[in-house]
Amino acid sequence: MNQIELQVLVEKISRDYFGLPFQHQATFNNRLRTTGGRYHLKSHHLDFNPKVLATFGTDEFLGVIKHELCHYHLHLSGKGFQHRDKEFKQLLTEVGGSRFVKSLSNPKPVKKRVVYQCQSCAQFIYRQRKVNTQKYVCGQCRGKLTYIKIQE
């Protein structure tokens, strides 16, 4: 989808779901990282993250367009346009927009944990790195540590 197709799509959704025209500019913004779209208060333009369309498909992207159009139309009509406002929440549920976009960041890798157990008090000790069991002892009773396993 290019900029012209995006502009036509936003204008069509605005007419179909809101019954009002969209008279400003809608563009893709590659610099958006964590958000699906942005509404500019001063210029009334809309920016959209192209990664949402590429990653999650058309349905999720339409939800983001409806979300930003809720901000747009409520702000221009002088009503509560922020996420916390009751009018915004009502309009968003009426048109079927998405409240939040799915996470665009890569999930963090699971950190491994090394498990040790004290021979005296049976306390489990969890570390991110292996420790020298000849040198280090239990912090509670000063007992000898034994290596158990690596948890993932």
Image (cartoon, helix red, strand yellow):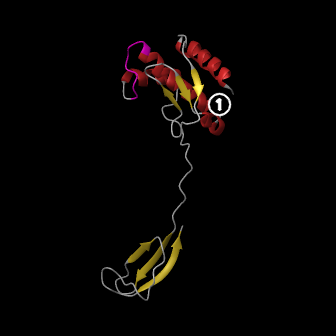
Q: Which residues are magenta?
A: 76-83
Q: In this picture, is 33 found above or below 152?
A: above
Residue 145 at what x, y percent from top left?
41, 84
Front residue of 49 and 91: 49
Residue at far left of view: 140
**Magenta portion: prevailing SS class:** loop
Q: How many marks?
A: 1
- Residue 67: give x, y in percent of width and height: 50, 26
Question: Camera-side residue: 27 or 112?
Answer: 27
Q: Quadrant of the N terminus?
A: top right
Graded by Cα atoms within 10 Å as few (under 14), some (14 to 19) or many (20 or more), the crowding at tag 1 reads few
Q: In the rendered view of the protein, which quadrant contains the C terminus?
A: bottom right
Picture quadrant of residue 120:
bottom left
Q: Residue at x 57, y 31 (%)?
A: 29
Kind of residue sitting beneath label 1: Thr
Residue at screen point 59% across, 14% down: 16
**What residue lies at 42% left-to-right and 17% top-to-bottom?**
75
**Residue that numbered label 1 is attached to:** 58
- Image-quadrant location for residue 87: top left
